[in-house]
Image (cartoon, rainbow, N blue to C red):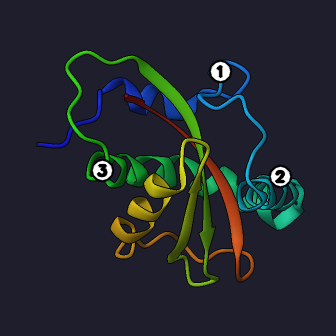
């Protein structure tokens, strides 16, 4: 059975400054692009408004997606990391990129195909969601 700690919901609300990144090396070009676009979209007026109304729900919906992609770990360490979601204007998750590895991002993208969020301010709208799991 795949499992995520209940602490993940708490970690979702914390800022990256509070939760150290699980990945210290140089980000891949795709991750760097996702980070840059998520910051830019969050700074725009429509992005700020969308995030104020919908970020908590987006984070909540990502926990079961992550649970389906992370194996049970008896002896692990609680690891916090950021995920970057690319949304369609209709609010569908098109892609997920993670700080951890591309395989986790692909799994989460596949598992999130049915996730419906509110309409995004634009096509290819990127958001950052912080999660934590035993890894």
Residue at the image point whose x is 75% and y is 46% from the top: 27
The C terminus is located in which quarter?
top left
Q: Position of residue 128 (x, y in %)?
A: 66, 50
On residue 62, the disc is none
Taking 114 as reference, is 50 above or below it? above
For the residues labelled 2 and 1, the Cα–Cα distance comes to: 18 Å
**Picture disc at residue 20:** 1
Q: Nearer the viewer, mark 2 or mark 1?
A: 1
Residue 9 as seen in the image, left or right of residue 64: right
Measure the C-alpha gap from mark 3 to mark 2: 25 Å
Residue at image position (28%, 34%) is 4
Residues 31 and 60: in front is 31
Q: Is residue 90 above or below residue 135?
A: below
Cα distance between the residues tagged 1 and 3: 22 Å
Mark 1 vs mark 3, foreground winner is 1
Picture coordinates of residue 12, whole percent (x, y): 52, 35
Q: Which residue is mark 3?
A: 64
Disc 1 residue crowd, few under 14, some 14–19, many 20+, Cα 10 Å? few
Using a 10 Å C-alpha cutoff, classify the residue at mark 3 as few (fewer than 14 neighbours), some (14 to 19) or many (20 or more): some
Q: Which residue is mark 2?
A: 39
**Image quarter of the N terminus:** top left
Q: Secondary structure at mark 3?
A: helix
Q: Secondary structure at mark 2?
A: helix
Of the numbered discs 2 and 1, the one sitting upstream in the chain is 1
Mark 1 and mark 3 lie on one chain; the one further toward the N terminus is 1
At 24% from the left edge and 40% from the top edge, which residue is drawn? 71
């Amino acid at each position: 059975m795949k499992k995520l700690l209940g602490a993940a919901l708490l970690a979702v609300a914390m800022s990256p400054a509070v939760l150290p990144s699980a990945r210290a090396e140089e980000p891949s070009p795709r991750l760097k692009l996702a980070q840059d676009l998520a910051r830019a979209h969050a700074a725009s007026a429509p992005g700020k408004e969308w995030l104020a109304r919908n970020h908590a729900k987006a984070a909540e919906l990502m926990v079961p997606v992550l649970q389906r992609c992370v194996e049970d770990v008896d002896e692990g360490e609680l690891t916090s990391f950021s995920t970057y979601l690319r949304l369609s204007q209709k609010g569908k998750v098109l892609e997920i990129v993670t700080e951890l590895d591309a395989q986790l991002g692909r799994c989460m993208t596949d598992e999130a195909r049915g996730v419906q969020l509110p309409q995004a301010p634009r096509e290819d709208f990127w958001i950052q969601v912080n999660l934590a799991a035993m890894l």
